[in-house]
Image (cartoon, helix red, strand yellow):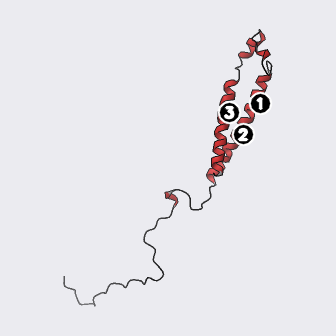
Amino acid sequence: MDWTSIIVVIHVLIALSIIGLVLLQHGKGADMGSGFGGGASGSLFGATGSANFLSRTTAVLATLFFLSSLGLAYLATNKPKEGGGTVMDRPVRTEPAKSATEAPKPAPAQPAPGKEVPQ
């Protein structure tokens, strides 16, 4: 497995984690209901503790997502040219390669000046 594949897998996992965390967070209007006995104060992190934890975790994952995006962009633009690439990157061969032992073919004989060749 090369680095590009590893970073793509990490990138997708981070993206899915960000989606999940954003869906878990409360909207701004949800805090108003907790002030009137909405029951959110009895949760695991308290009334505001869950918002702070989820917001910070989302910010950390967003930073990692940004860095992995930069890493993928760098790897995409600086690929090594070791025989890889597409068909369009390869040089075109116009004639078959000649071996070192093959003698050059002689030029066709030209008729002497003034003498015409019958057709």
Q: Which mark is residue 17?
A: 3
Counting from the top left corner in percent of width and height, residue 8 is at 63, 44
Between 3 and 56, the one lying in front of the other is 3
Q: Could you tell me residue 37's position as x and y percent? A: 77, 9
| Element assignment for label 3 | helix
Which residue does the numbered mark 2 point to in the structure image?
64
Kind of residue indicated by mark 3: Ser
Which numbered disc, 2 or 1, marks the residue that appears first in the sequence?
Answer: 1
Q: Position of residue 115 (x, y in %)?
A: 23, 90
Mark found first going from the N terminus, 3 or 1: 3
Q: Which mark is residue 56?
A: 1
Which three-letter amino acid code belongs to the residue tagged 2?
Leu
Q: CA distance from mark 3 to mark 2?
A: 11 Å
Q: Residues within 10 Å of mark 1 (few under 14, many from 20)?
A: few
Q: Marks 1 and 2: in contact by CB < 8 Å? A: no
Nearer mark to the viewer, of 3 and 2: 3
